[in-house]
């Protein structure tokens, strides 16, 4: 798979870009379908918050507010289920049996476990292991969505990519469309040009003996955007 250092470089650059851009945080329940049953993720629209009072609102939920709150296990699970259209049990399993979020790693994700671990009160802030656990959950969930979209056509999230083939070039329209879809699903907004450019760096530096696949790019792009502080904190 893509060089680990390159992936983490993209994650850190994207986190810095989001912070410098002053991106607002999304409210709880963002991205849910509207009353007329339309898809909240599909369709073009102006930059969130930029439309005039006469313009029609964009066909997806728009981020609002600036409060910051650690997103704990239930919120992460709900947002990944919504954004990636997976069932809770499909997000992450340890040894293929035990649920990562609700069972194995519930303490690190801000929950409590009074009966097995004796932890009655959840932690007030992320633990030293929280970031590793979040990465585990995100990578598993993104990989599960990419595999599901590869098996069923058209895909629900990565519909623009041919997941059975090699990764497209960075300037391919499908790449920018995929990045925009992931930003809308995970962060409830459109990406800024600089953020799109950062995610595109995942397509650089392919190893000649093992070129990157479209499925790998889809998984890593999802992981990179999901790893941002904007997704992990409300």
Image: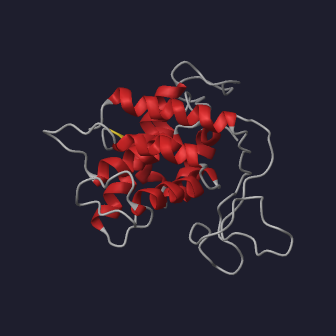
**Residue farthest toward the top in the current orientation of the protein:** 128
Q: How far from the left and from the top, in percent, is residue 204?
A: 33, 40
Q: How far from the left and from the top, in percent, is residue 189?
A: 65, 55
Give whichever of 175, 145 is nearer the camera. Answer: 175
Is 53 above or below relative to 163? Answer: below
Q: Residue at x 69, y 57 (%)?
A: 30
Q: Residue at x 16, y 41 (%)?
A: 210
Residue 79 seen: yes
Specify the quadrant of the image occupied by residue 113.
top right
Give whichever of 57, 198 is nearer the camera. Answer: 198
Specify the quadrant of the image occupied by residue 71.
top right
Give the left or right position of residue 93, taking residue 182 as reference. left
Residue 86 seen: no
Is 94 above or below relative to 50? Answer: above
Give whichever of 21, 107 is nearer the camera. Answer: 21
Q: Which quadrant would the C terminus be assigned to in this image?
A: top right
Give the left or right position of residue 157, taking residue 108 as reference. left
Q: How far from the left and from the top, in percent, is residue 48?
A: 72, 59
Q: Residue at x 52, y 48 (%)?
A: 196
**Residue farthest toward the left in the current orientation of the protein:** 209
Is 39 above or below relative to 24? Answer: below
Q: Residue at x 20, y 37 (%)?
A: 207
Give the color scheme: rainbow, by chain, secondary structure or one colour.
secondary structure
Specify the quadrant of the image occupied by residue 206.
top left
**Residue farthest toward the bottom in the current orientation of the protein:** 36
Give whichever of 195, 7 is nearer the camera. Answer: 195
**Residue farthest toward the front in the current orientation of the protein:** 171
Give the left or right position of residue 200, taking residue 16 as reference. left
């Amino acid at each position: 798979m893509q060089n680990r250092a390159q992936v983490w470089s993209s994650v850190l650059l994207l986190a810095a870009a989001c912070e410098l851009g002053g991106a607002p945080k999304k409210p709880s329940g963002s991205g849910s379908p509207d009353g007329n049953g339309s898809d909240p993720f599909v369709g073009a629209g102006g930059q969130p918050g930029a439309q005039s009072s006469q313009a029609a609102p964009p066909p997806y939920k728009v981020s609002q507010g600036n409060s910051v709150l650690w997103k704990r296990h239930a919120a992460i699970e709900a947002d990944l289920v919504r954004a990636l259209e997976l069932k809770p049990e499909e997000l992450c399993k340890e040894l293929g049996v035990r649920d990562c979020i609700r069972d194995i790693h519930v303490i690190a994700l801000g929950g409590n476990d009074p009966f097995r671990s004796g932890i009655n009160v959840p932690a007030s802030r992320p633990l030293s292991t929280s970031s590793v656990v979040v990465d585990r959950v995100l990578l598993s969930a993104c990989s599960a969505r990419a595999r599901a979209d590869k098996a069923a056509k058209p895909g629900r999230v990565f519909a623009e990519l041919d997941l059975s083939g090699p990764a497209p070039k960075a300037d391919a329209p499908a790449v920018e469309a995929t990045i925009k879809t992931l930003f809308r699903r995970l962060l409830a907004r459109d990406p800024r040009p600089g953020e799109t450019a950062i995610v595109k760096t995942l397509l650089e530096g392919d190893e000649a003996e093992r070129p990157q696949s479209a499925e790998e790019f889809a998984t890593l792009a999802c992981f990179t955007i999901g790893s941002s502080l904007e997704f992990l904190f409300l």
